[in-house]
Amino acid sequence: MRRNDLIDRRRPRIAISWTAPLLLTAACIGCAGRPLTGLNPAATATAATHTSGVRRAEELKKRIASIAPVGTSLSHAEQIMRKEGFECSFAVDDEGRDVLRCVRHDGGALLLARRWTVEFPYRDGAVLEARVE
């Protein structure tokens, strides 16, 4: 076996070792900033409009107050939140009050992903407030 034969056999291994990380990096960059919709298939059909791009809880709370203010019917608040890409369910909060809890995952990269939780305590079928975590 000649020396050139050994060198030619090693070249494909080097190319393969660079290909996998390059493809993985490209995939991660392409997914960054897109919502994770595994928990809410409806989020792929309707993109968030009023609440997209929010980075701070205070800002999200202001935007939610503008689209689902205090006194909004519970069914309408749930409909609005689902259109914004949230998955909603009824729960009991730490104080024992009934709430509508809505959750959405934003971001594609693991380190940049954000989980938003919005709770709507209610009485007589109307929203009392919106709490954002």
Image: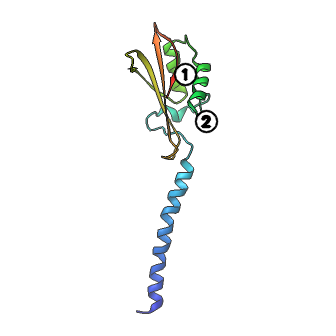
Residue 67 locus on image (x, y percent): 60, 20
Kindly state the secondary structure of the residue where label 1 is placed: helix
Q: Callout 2: few (<14), some (14-19), or many (20+) C-alpha neighbours within 10 Å? A: few
Residue found at the far bottom of this picture: 2
Residue lying at 50% horizontally and 72% vertically, measured from the top left = 15
Colour scheme of the rendered structure: rainbow
Residue 49 locus on image (x, y percent): 61, 30
110 vs 98: above or below = below
* Circle nearer the viewer, 2 or 1: 2
110 vs 90: above or below = below
For the residue marked with disc 1, what is the amino acid? Ile
Instruction: Give the Cα distance between marks 2 and 1.
Output: 17 Å
For the residue marked with disc 2, what is the amino acid? Gly
Q: Earlier in the sequence, mark 2 or mark 1?
A: 2
Q: Which one is nearer the viewer's eye here, 114 or 39?
A: 114
**Residue to which mark 2 is pinned:** 53
Q: Callout 1: few (<14), some (14-19), or many (20+) C-alpha neighbours within 10 Å? A: some
133 vs 34: above or below = above
Quarter of the picture holding the N terminus = bottom left
Residue 99 locus on image (x, y percent): 43, 18
**Residue to which mark 1 is pinned:** 80
